Amino acid sequence: MCHCPNTSGSHCKWLLFPQTLITFVNKHLNKLNLEVAELDTQFADSVYLVLLLGLLEGYFVPLYNFFLTDENFDQKVYNVSFSFELMQDEGLERPRPEDIVNCDLKSALMVLYNLFTRYRNVD
């Protein structure tokens, strides 16, 4: 039985799932003393995504390969596209980069869910 007010059981699971992804992401980003609270906005520039991919795959991504402090929409799209290239190298699905930059939660959840299902047992 669902304990979420005014929701069905299946809807309740989707309300709790983003927290599972935040826990997964923070488990790995904490190794770099980073933490995520908002999936849609904090992944909009893809800096955390690039760093997370490096941690999950066990490689260092040189900081000159992406904009660590992006200043405009184009730099954010570049970062997201770069992170998607890394994901493509690993055979992971990804949405349009612009959707991530525009803080589309559904797109952010899709990307993180793909990472979660592949790497949930990685320490």
Image (spheres, helix red, strand yellow):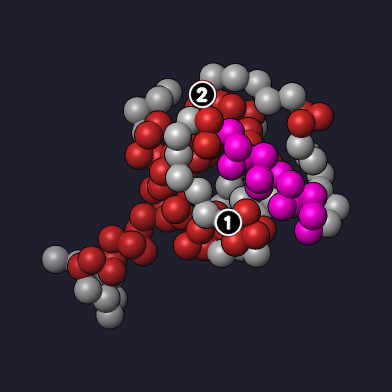
Regarding residue 8, the answer to whether it shows in the image is yes
Q: Three-letter amino acid code at disc 2?
A: Glu
Question: Depth-wise, is mark 2 or mark 1 nearer the camera?
Answer: 1
The residue positioned 58% from the left and 56% from the top of the image is 96
Could you say whether the residue bearing mark 2 is in a helix, strand or loop? helix
Does the magenta segment cover residue 83? yes
Does the magenta segment cover residue 50? no
Q: Which one is in front, 41 or 30?
A: 41
For the view shown, which residue lies furthest in the right direction? Answer: 71
Q: Residues within 10 Å of mark 1 (few under 14, many from 20)?
A: few
Disc 2 and disc 1 in contact, CB within 8 angstroms = no
Lower position in the chain sequence, tag 2 or tag 1: 2
Quadrant the C terminus occupies: top left
User: In the rendering, at what x and y percent does residue 95 appear?
Assistant: 52, 54
Per the image, the residue denoted by label 1 is 96
The residue positioned 47% from the left and 62% from the top of the image is 106
User: In the rendering, at what x and y percent does residue 15 appear?
Assistant: 36, 64
Q: Give the range drawn in magenta.
A: 73-86
Q: How far apart are marks 2 and 1 (CA)?
A: 22 Å
Per the image, the residue denoted by label 2 is 57
For the view shown, which residue lies furthest in the bottom direction? Answer: 6
